[in-house]
Structure formats: structure tokens, C-alpha cells
Image (cartoon, rainbow, N blue to C red):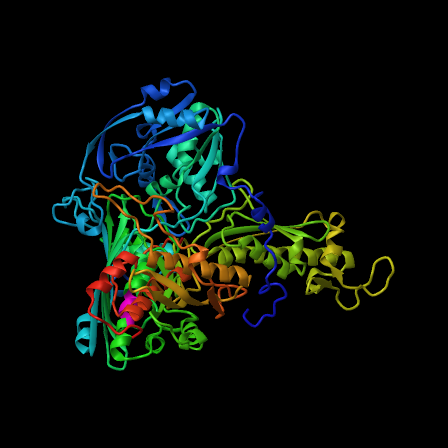
Amino acid sequence: MAIVHLPGEQSVTIDAPRVPELFAALRQRFPDIADQLEEMAIAIDGDIYQDPGYQDLRPETEVHFVPRIAGG
Amino acid sequence: MSERTFAVVGTRPVRHDGVDKVTGRAAYGADANWPGMLHGVVVRSPHAHARIVSIDTSAAEAMPGVKAVLVGSELPDINATIPLGEAALDLRDMSYSMMARDKALYHGQAVAAVAATTLDIAREAAATIVVSYEKLTPVMNVDEATAPDAPILHPTMRTKGAPPDAPPSNLASRLEMKRGDVDAGFADADLVIEREFRTPTVHQGYIEPHACIARCGEDGRAVIWCATQGPFFVRDASAAIAGLDPAHVKVIPSEIGGGFGGKIVVYLEPVALLLAKKAQRPVKMVMNRDEVFRATGPTSGTKIRVKIGAKRDGTFVAAKVSFWYEAGAFKGSPVGAGAMCSIAPYKFPNFFLEAHDVVVNKPKVAAYRAPGSPMASFAVESVVDEIARELKMDAIDLRLKNANQEGDQAPYGPKFGPIGLKSVLEAAKNHPHWKAPLGPNQGRGFAIGFWFNGGMNSSATVTLGGDGSAAVQTGNPDIGGTRAAQAMMVAEELGIPVERVRPSVGDTDSAGYTDLTGGSRVCFATGMAVIRAAEDVREQLKARAAKIWNVEPSAVGWDSGNLIPPAGAKETKSGHDAKPLTVAEVAAKMAHTGGPVVGRASLYAPMAGPGFGAHICDLEVDQETGRSRVVRYTAIQDVGKAVHPSYVEGQIQGGAVQGIGWALNEEYVYNRDGAMENAGFLDYRMPVASDLPMIDTVIVEVANPLHPYGVRGVGEVPICPPLAACANAMRSATGIRFTQLPLSPPRVLEKIMAAAPVAVGA
């Protein structure tokens, strides 16, 4: 079960083997913020993916949603 | 990784592109001239906010020598975003910003363009284009833009997340980040300091203006030569905006005279492409400095309110920060990044951050070196300096007490991996500069800064020559010495002299897809691709040597550029024991062992290996004029591993100098109509070499575990601390806390004259 920290302070555990399944589960549980989440970058165990694609999620993986970042 | 002993990495060879650059042979954006080319010029809005009633181009079109005229209504209406490597950009906004349609939203925005046989004819023709405007009131800062009765830039724009029936707003979005109970944290604090800060609109200030040449044939196939940080992005964005198939567009990146984030987005390229398509001749377009200032991305002017609470022993207990960043005329300021960076160095058990993205009648902001972070660092580090003063603590000790380290949770969520913040602070504390005596009217400031550092997509190709030399090609324009670094990586992996490696930047048809040069990602992510491509060559060389010795490839060893035969291997002809072969010896036999050897690699890297820097600044202030002078400056930074220390030091020095300019002099000065009044380097005062002392640098190397050499990004961190380092030095020199930049002589003198006598050097 991935530990998913949503924007704000809410955290949930979600059984998802990869990022696409995580988004599908989040869309079902949190339809109001699903679009917003899909526009954000994701930190998976500390590393930030601007485009997380099909990244694998281990059990106990920690996922944070963070604003997208543009470097110069 | 960090324990590895390097032969080439860490040395300082002469850069491969150096002679061409110092002799003027290197070809930049404006250096290309193609047969039959036309010259394109842009007609720009004289108003910061106006409705475009009509555009009459008939006189221009009738002028001899004019081959094409373009107005916004001819551009396709698109509704798409495009991944920019590190973010997604709204192509519709970019298209509208590049060429206005129904409204002009900033002074200098393009409204039409002309291509003619000579530059003079093009200019004359542009002057005949009659644009009828209905002037509107401009909003030039976040206060005006968010006032209850503010003129609205975009009648259809509502604050993100607002209900569909909400009124239109200039507030594009609002974001919150929080942890713990911030009110309880402040209640528990022994000291609370709250201040409001403002920073001006500033430009990246690259020396080379935007320039390109484009051609488009009858078959729709197009070629663009331009100075850009991201040729693949230029290809995709230009094709989309011009309504072409990106499969038919090739972009050749020229040498680039600085970018710092400002040469990521497109301004001229789609216009040149469309003019070339209409005229069926190549079109060259070159901005002058005035156009660069008025119509290309500066970075945000900001308002930031900071409140920090600390215990008597210096422990930080709460932070509340409100960020208001100008996005320019279209949504998308770097306010989210600014909020995330602002308190990233510190362990705050309780915080509340709110970030506002606000549109104003200025050019759409573009990325500028650690976008969003320097202004946030200025505000927070100024308050941290005040806390140290109030608590009578050493400024570095206070930061060490609260510094994040590996395993601590970053304010934006995840836990930090190995980071060098404490090592950087210790290095600063132990530097002779920190304890050196100050002269009369001098003050010392200290500040730290943070940037994430990028990753993303990179590709590399390493081609072995028959003489054992190698060529390495990537799709990243070289801004900061990356070609030299990439050649060094190949030399390191293949055990050949770096002078025998030829690094080059490929065009979009010849290089594997690579995200832009930016985000401090090239030496890290593209460097990894280069290392893997060189490793690929090495593995192929082992297979070739195995063929020569008639052994299994896995049995072949490698030692410093030599292929080592397994015990018992024999020379085929002589029957003697096989001797090690050099890369050149195996390369010479490529044709007989399987053909050419080409190593390839492509990868996607996460943003990893965040960087921290600390700067010490000594300012001398003329109490009679308010003019300040940097008399000593030291920049300390964790770079993971310095591949070419000279270019790492150069990056640190360059970032520091840009930050010093931001702190002391630079600002867009607007008149009441929203027109910039200082659009030139004489009046927009950037520091030059004679203004500054040598910037001393200290490289700290805390290895990034996600890179084979331990490399971290370097280029963006050093622009984060200088704003606050200078302001804190000014506080030390004058006794006055400045909350608004720049610290220009008139502003400083006004405060000095208004202040009661203070203890100078306190």
C-alpha cells in the first residue's frame, strides 16, 4: 500500500502497483480534486517526477504531490 | 561513486569550444545568412493595455520589396499545452503573447510583422501599419491587479478552482502548503518577527538578443536556426503555433550567448516561420535590446509577507508566508516553486504558506535561474537575519541549529536524501571571510539558498573513431561548459585523453530527444546519458577484444583505457600470451571485428540531488550618496561532484553576480502608462566586471547518490542567496532593514537621511 500525501495535510493509503493505477484510484476516491492532482508533479520516495508516467510504486512507497517546477 | 578515483573528472582542461568563441568564429543566432533571405521586423503595441479595434496593413503590403505581412488573426487558434521538460506550457497563451489578437496586454507586445528584402524596407513598411487601439487602464503590480475594482486582463479567466459562475479575476491561482498548527507555534514562540518585502521585475540580461532565421518550403518542410535553450521545444512549439506538422520542422541550435531561462520559450521563431511560409523565402529576425527588455520574459515582481517565530535558544517554531508573484500578462508565475524553496533549508514544525499567481500588464514572465526562489529567499533570509540579531546569535549558528539534513522532511513533502546544507554552513563558518575585520562604513551579510535541481529526458551518442578518438553528441545547447564536461566524462569512461574527444550539439534531426538546457539538469541528467553511452562503447570494445582473442566477452577485463585479456588467452598469429590492448588498438580493427562502434543511451531522471549555497557579502556604503560597493564576496555551495571545477566556479560566480545586480541596481522602471522607461543596458544597470571584486568560491562535495559521479546541479542555487546577503550587509552597514529591492543609491540615501543616527557596522 502506497502512502499518499495529498495537498494540504490529508494522507491516505492506496493499493496501486504503478502511478496510473494510483491516479485511477484517486479519481474514484477524490473526484473533486482529481484534475488538480493530475496537473501536479509527484515526489516518489523523495525524488520529484514532473511527469511520473508509469513509475512503479513499492509497498510503503511515500507519494507527495507538489507544484510543477520550471527551472531556468 | 564518491570514493571513486578519477583520472579526468575534477581536472580543468581547456574547453573544446573556447578558441572559436574568443576568436569570433562561433556562430550565434544572428550569424546565419541564407541565400534569398528576407528581413523580418515586428510592430509592437505602444500601450500596456488596449483593445485592438483594427489593423490596416494595406500600405505595407503595397510597398515594393515587402514580401509578407502577418497579423494575429492569421495564426491558428490552438488549445494545447506542451511538456517543457520540467513543466507544461500553455501554447495558446504563448501564441497570444507572441502576437496579440483582440487585446494588447503589455507595452511592446507584437501586433503585426513584416518581411521585406532589406531591413530598412521592412522597418519602413512596419511604420506604415496602422493599428487602432481603444486604451484601457493597465494594472502594473499585484496590489492594483487584485484591488476590488481592478481592470480585468482576461474576461474569461477565473481563479483556478473557482466555480464557473465566479466573476473573472486577475488572480490566476492560489495554493496552500501547511504543516502542524501555525497559530499554536507562534503562541509558543519567544520572538516573532513579521515583515513585508517587495522585489521588482528584473530581466535575465543575457548578452545575445533573441535571433533566428527560418525557411519553409512548398512542401511544408521547415528549418529554423536559432539561439535557444531547447531546440526540441522550439520545434514542437513553433510547429503548433504556426500550424505545421512537427515532423516537418527541423531546429538547428546556434551557439547561445546566455539564456538563464529566458531562451526557453519562443518569441520570434513561429513568426519567422509563418512569414517564410507566406513569402516562400527564408526570413531572418533579430531583436534589438529594447525589444528584448519590453517583449521577452523577465521574472516576477513580488510581494512577500513573512512571519517567523523562534524560541529564545533560536529554535524555529512557526512560519507563515504569503507570496504574491506577478505572472505578467498570462498566468504562470513561479510562485509555487518560490513557496517550496522559501523555508526548504529549515526545520519548521509548524508552517502555513500561501502562494498567489497574479496577471498584470507586463510581459509574460519566463524562467530565470531558480525561478521563484531568489525573491523568497530574500524575504525569509532577511527575517532570519533579524532573528539572529534580536537573539544575539551568530547568523551561521542560528541557521545550523535549524538546518535540515538527510532524513528531515522538506516543507514540500518528501524527505531529503543526502544534502550538503550543514557542510556548506560549516564551510562558511570556517572561512576566513566570516571573521575578517570590516572597514569604515562596511557591513557584512550572510544568507543561504536552495534549489531542487532538475532531471528529465536526455539522450547521448558516443561514436568511436578508427584512431581511438571519440565524438559525443547530445541535444543540449551548451551554455555553461557542458560540452567540456561531457567530453571529460567520455574520456573518463574510455581512458582516452579529453583532447581526443569531440563534443557537439546536435540538431533535432540528428540528436536523440533531449529536454532543454535548464533547471541545472544537463551535467546531471544528460551527463548520465553520456556516461552510459560511453559505457556502451566500452562493452562493445570488450566484445571486439574478445573476438580478437577468441574468448568470451565476459572474460575481458578493463583497466584505465586498456582491455585486459583473461589468463591463458593467446595471440592468434604468434601463439604468445595475449597482451592488453588500448582503445586505439581495438578501434583500428573495428572493420574486422563487426563494424563501427557507436554507444547510445537515453534515460529519464527524476529531479534529484537538491542543492544549497551560502553567501557572505561585504558592502561598503557611501553615507552621503547611498551608493554601495561590494568589497568582498564569498560563495559556498554543495555541488555533489565538480566535473570541471573551473566551470562550476564560473557558474557560482555568475549566479552570485546576477543576484548582486538584482539586489543593488536592477529594476524595470515603468511610467504611469505602463511603459518601461529604462529598456537598455545604460539605464537598466547590471553589474559589470569593474563593479565587483573577484567572487571567491568554495566547492563542497556531498555526493548525490543518484549520479554515478555524485553530480548535483550547480547553475541555479547561486542566484538564490545574494539578494538577502546584500540586504543583510546593508543592514549591517547602515543599521536600516531594507524590505524593498533594489538597494539603489536613491532608495538607500532616502532611508539614511530619514533614519535617526545609527551605529554603523552594528
Viewer-side residue, B503 vs B679: B679
Percent across and percent down for residue B541 are 69, 56
Q: Is residue B384 magenta?
A: yes
Q: Of all residues shown, which one is farthest toward the left?
A: B149
Quarter of the figure with the C terminus of chain B: bottom left
Which region shows up in magenta? B380-385
Residue B44 sits above or below residue B457 on the image: above
Percent across and percent down for residue B140 are 22, 46
Viewer-side residue, B548 vs B3: B3
Residue appearing at x 71%, y 64% in the figure: B555
Q: Is residue B391 left or right of residue B476?
A: left
Residue B709 sits above or below residue B405 on the image: above
Quadrant hosting residue B678: top left
Percent across and percent down for residue B721 are 36, 64
Q: Is residue B502 left or right of residue B292?
A: right
Viewer-side residue, A16 vs B592: B592
Decide whether the magenta segment is chiefly helix, strand or loop.
helix
Quarter of the figure with the N terminus of chain B: bottom right
Quadrant hosting residue B498: bottom right
Q: Is residue B709 magenta?
A: no
Number of marks in picture? 0
Residue B740 can be seen in this image: no
Q: Of all residues shown, which one is farthest toward the front?
A: B624
Residue B674 can be seen in this image: yes
